Image: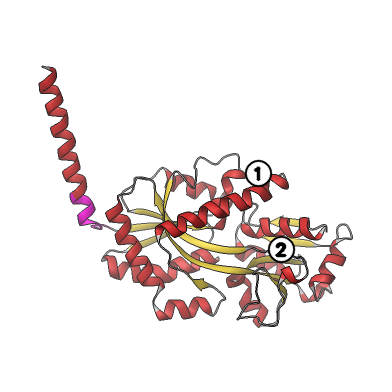
Amino acid sequence: MWSRLLSSLLLALASMGLVFTASAQDYPYKPIKIMVPYPPGGVTDVATRMVAPKMSETLGQPIIIENIPAAGGVVGTNAVARAAPDGYTLMSAFDSFATNPYMYKGVQHDPLKDFVPISLMVKSPQLLVVHPGSGIKSIADLIQQGKEKNKVFFSTPGAGTSSRLSAELLKSMAGMDITLVSYRGGAAALNDLLGGQVTGMIASMGLVLPHVQSGKILAIGVSSPTRSAQQPNVPTIASVIPGFEAQSWTGMVAPAGTPKPILDKVHAALVKALASPDVKDKLAAQGIEVVGSSSAEFADWLQKETVRWSKVIKDRSITLE
């Protein structure tokens, strides 16, 4: 009797394997959803909406983008972690993806265990910008004003974003005081800076560059080790605060357990879309560098970002509900 049961079980498992293999080969046979767990208008949302139509052409199915702007990306990311690993739910992750578990108490996912990296899509240095009415014209001016309590207010796209962490790092390394005001997304944070409600912010170049170019805000520093081609006259923050470096990035991930043949199809479609001249040119104009990495390269990037910023979070005792 036991041998018959075992044979039946093995036959059932083999059958499921055949069905599973067939479904992976047939992928995709229905629309694909890409979750963007942040508000519309930010770098991650913009980059995703640029590549989605081209990915759709390659994969032969519509791609639906869904924004869930809550808790710095935690709510949407938790949902994707629980989604079926069938390739029909993907996620564009912002840099906070690697750090939220170290700050938020309500995180129900592990970025390194509950997801599989597909590709690092884009990365961008951050610009340190101030409102023209602040009287600040250089990093030295900012540090001087920042050493006077309650003088400097920075907006951030969210409590757990890289913008917030970069501002914390700036405060720590420069030994100055900055009051940080968190908003629900980059667009909202930028709007209050443009209106003069806050002194400045440090944010992805893609978000603030158009307003720097129009003269509505003033760029006084760039977070990369070398000057930016888009703003060659803006000094690096490291030239005044040695060792300072920070970058914003966006990458695509899928729930852990998604079959490799499916991941390979998504990766090929994504990298092809990123390599399109019109996509590269539009993003480059905003100071955003197209990457299009392998899965292994993105996994290595995630690991390094997690280690680096978790130390900042611990050192600055950053804890969020």
Q: Percent from the top left, x then y, of residue 59?
A: 28, 65
Q: Quadrant of residue 140?
A: bottom right
> Which residue is at 86% across, 58% downward?
150
Residue at the spot of label 1 = 320
- Can residue 273 be seen here? yes
Q: Residues within 10 Å of mark 2 (few under 14, many from 20)?
A: few
The amino acid sitting under disc 2 is: Gly
Q: CA distance from mark 1 to mark 2?
A: 27 Å
Quarter in which the N terminus is drawn: top left
> Which residue is at 54% across, 63% downward?
249
| 134 sits to left or right of 259 | right
Q: Which residues are magenta?
A: 22-30
> Which residue is at 39% across, 77% downward?
276
Is residue 129 one of those drawn in magenta? no
Quarter in which the C terminus is drawn: top right
Earlier in the chain: of badge 1 and badge 2, it is 2
Name the foreground residue: 235 vs 317. Answer: 235
Q: Percent from the top left, x then y, of residue 208?
A: 63, 72
Q: Percent from the top left, x then y, of residue 36?
A: 47, 58
Mark 2 lies on a secondary structure that is loop
Residue at the spot of label 2 = 243
| 15 sits to left or right of 260 | left
